[in-house]
Image (spheres, grey):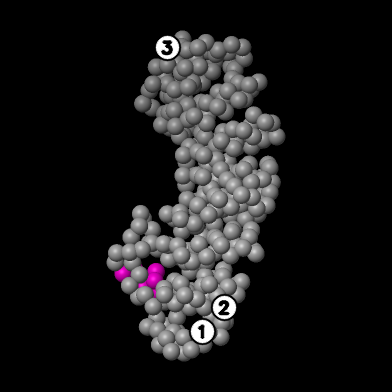
Amino acid sequence: PLAVAEASLRSSQEDIRVRGLDRLVALAGGGKGPKPPEAEALLADAIEDESPKVRGEAFRTLWSWHASDPQTALDRAQLARFPDLRLRAVEELKAHGEQPWAAERLHAAIGDRDASVAQAAYEAVVKLRGKAAVEPHLAAMASIHPSVRESGARGAAQAPVSDAARSALIRLLEDDHGGPRTAAIEALDRLLPAEAGPLHIGLQSSHLDLRVRAAELCAARRDEQLINPMRALLADKSLINVGRGSAFAVPSAELPIQLLGPLRARAASALATLGSPRLVKYFAAELLKDDYPDVR
């Protein structure tokens, strides 16, 4: 009888594989009592099926077989090749989140190789533990996914400042993607309102977008440290574009005006926001004659 179920599960037809699962469940006693090792092995194969319907049914079967031992089913789902099953595991873990075994697995899922799974796990842990818990933010900032790193940095801004969070945020200032580094400089500005060091690091960044954002934050603090970097940026009309996939790193060919223009305008706006008397002559003699209308 198991051979029939196995043959069905090996079929190229999705509906036949689903019927094979039904037969497997019937042969295994409908989820009651011990299961033959062969049945467990067939179910493990079905969880890796190419069809979302088949593997979804396989997970439901696995869940019913291990209703009294959910850790076994969830551990298997978290190892699945397809992210939809790992996301299902995160949802079930969230429902059991008050239990230590589930909380531990949820935290580990923040490191998932799929961004949607990692993000869901991060949000679940933050909801369970509260925004003040630093550990989930640190785990998110260490993710391989830029979007999750950005979420972690924004979350860290809501938690009490700590040495670990500060170090992680400083590292993100050199991230290859704009989202995480912008979120990091904004978090550092919020967490360290009396400390200018992180913003000054941003002003010297190799990433043009981060330099400009740091200048905007310095301007709000009336920190004149932004003047020289922004004047240099505005004077350099051949800012260049290399750097591992970043449109805002230096140097090689002239940035397109669609990127360079708005950044130069923001740099000029930061200087205007600062409102230093030192800049009046500079505005009149140079910026009012700038080639880019938004700077003028």
In percent of the image, x 45 and y 62: which residue is there? 205
Q: Is residue 46 left or right of residue 250?
A: right
In percent of the image, x 36 and y 75: which residue is there? 236
Q: Quick check: can you spot residue 23?
A: no
**Residue indicated by mark 2:** 274
Position in image of residue 89 (x %, y %): 56, 33
Circle 1 crowding by C-alpha within 10 Å: few under 14, some 14–19, many from 20:
some
| Residue 3 disc label | 3
State the separation of the CA atoms marked 1 and 2: 9 Å
Q: Nearer the viewer, mark 1 or mark 3?
A: 1
Q: Secondary structure at mark 1?
A: helix
Relative depth, front residue between 33 and 229: 229
In percent of the image, x 29 and y 66: which residue is there? 253
Q: Mark 3: which amino acid?
A: Ala
Q: Which picture quadrant has residue 71?
A: top right
In the rendered view, tell whether residue 88 sits above or below residue 258.
above
Q: Magenta stretch?
A: 254-261
Q: Quick check: can you spot residue 62?
A: yes
The reply to whether callout 1 and callout 2 are in contact (CB within 8 Å) is yes
Relative depth, front residue between 59 and 223: 223
In the rendered view, tell whether residue 293 sits above or below residue 128.
below
Residue lying at the far left of the rendered structure: 253
Circle 3 crowding by C-alpha within 10 Å: few under 14, some 14–19, many from 20:
few
Position in image of residue 222 (x %, y %): 60, 75
